[in-house]
Image (spheres, rainbow, N blue to C red):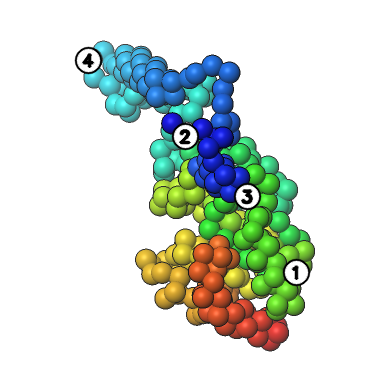
Amino acid sequence: MISANDLSPAELAALLHFHADAGVDWLLEDTAIDRFAEFEASRAKQQVRQTDNARSGQTAGRGDAGKPSAAAGGRPAAATPSMPNMAVPDEQAVAAARFAAESARSLEELKTALESFNGCNLKNGARNTVFATGTPGSKVMIIGPMPDADDDRDGLPFSGKAGMLLDRMLAAIDLDRNQIALANTVPWRPPGNRAPSGPEMNICRPFIERQIALFEPKLLLLLGNVTARFFFGGTGTIHTMRGQWREVPVGGAIIPALASLHPQELLNAPASKALAWQDLLSFKSRLAQM
């Protein structure tokens, strides 16, 4: 086992950043905890509850002939609200998300609805719900894929180094983050910064579409693979989808949208900045025409 005393400051800083990006909140506990055993015990209890509920539901719903009655629907009884961290079927979660989003008449109501929504498992592992920032009526809305570790920590979209680079990119075309709206397709950071799954994105779709509808932007700038695929469809890479103006239907409106490279990708591959600059000039030109 390597001791922290054996690491250089740079190596120790890199190790700490690695743990933080992986979602580690505490490096030490007062007493040793076997997380694997804790998880297995929790799962066993959950299975017992589900079995008990299924048996009680089937017993209560049986008719005189010993068959499930119409009221029971031939299925186990639904989980009760008191059962914590129970997974919600995807189709029910999507319906609940759509109802919550469409019921919100303002950004404040939508933020409250999103923070209260528990139908997406991503929320369980995130520190914060990252809601859009900006002023309604902003002509420009920039949307990224999902919060990274900095966004999750600060509770704001486009924080940290990627956010600082985005600020410089915006300044190059005479924009400022205080003049526009910023958002993420998914409001919760996935564990380890993995890409959100299809069901997770379907659950989050009503919320980001409602954010767009309430902000009423005239142009959308979509950053990164996940975001471009989310709004444009298909399985192409950002390098095949970037630089092309397309129309995105949201809330009864059709909004012109341009896909480009995410600032984090530019930090990882600085050679791609020339491509991003071409996209920014195209975006600036379209904005000037308005």
State how far apart marks 1 and 2 are (Cα).
Answer: 46 Å
Query: Which residue shows up at 71% across the image and 56% down it?
Result: 133
Query: Which residue shows up at 68% across the image and 86% down it?
Result: 289
| Residue for badge 3 | 150
Q: Residues within 10 Å of mark 1 (few under 14, many from 20)?
A: some
**Secondary structure at numbered mark 2:** loop
State how far apart marks 4 and 2 are (Cα).
Answer: 68 Å
Residue kind at label 3, given as amino acid type = Asp
| Residue for badge 2 | 2
**Secondary structure at numbered mark 3:** helix
State how far apart marks 1 and 3 are (Cα).
Answer: 20 Å
Q: Quadrant of the C terminus?
A: bottom right
Of the residues tagged 1 and 2, which is closer to the observer? Answer: 2
Does 125 sit above or below residue 258? above
Of the residues tagged 4 and 3, which is closer to the observer? Answer: 3
**Secondary structure at numbered mark 4:** loop
Which label sits on residue 135? none
| Residue for badge 1 | 176
Residue 167 x %, y %? 70, 67
Residue kind at label 4, given as amino acid type = Ala
Query: Which residue shows up at 71% across the image and 52% down it?
Result: 107
| Residue for badge 4 | 65
Residue sitting nearer the eye, 67 or 211: 211
Please indicate, yes or no, whether residue 143 appears anywhere in the rendered image: yes
Compare marks 1 and 3 and give the one earlier in the sequence: 3
Residue kind at label 1, given as amino acid type = Asp
Residue 228 x %, y %? 48, 67
Residue kind at label 2, given as amino acid type = Ile
Residue 165 x %, y %? 65, 66
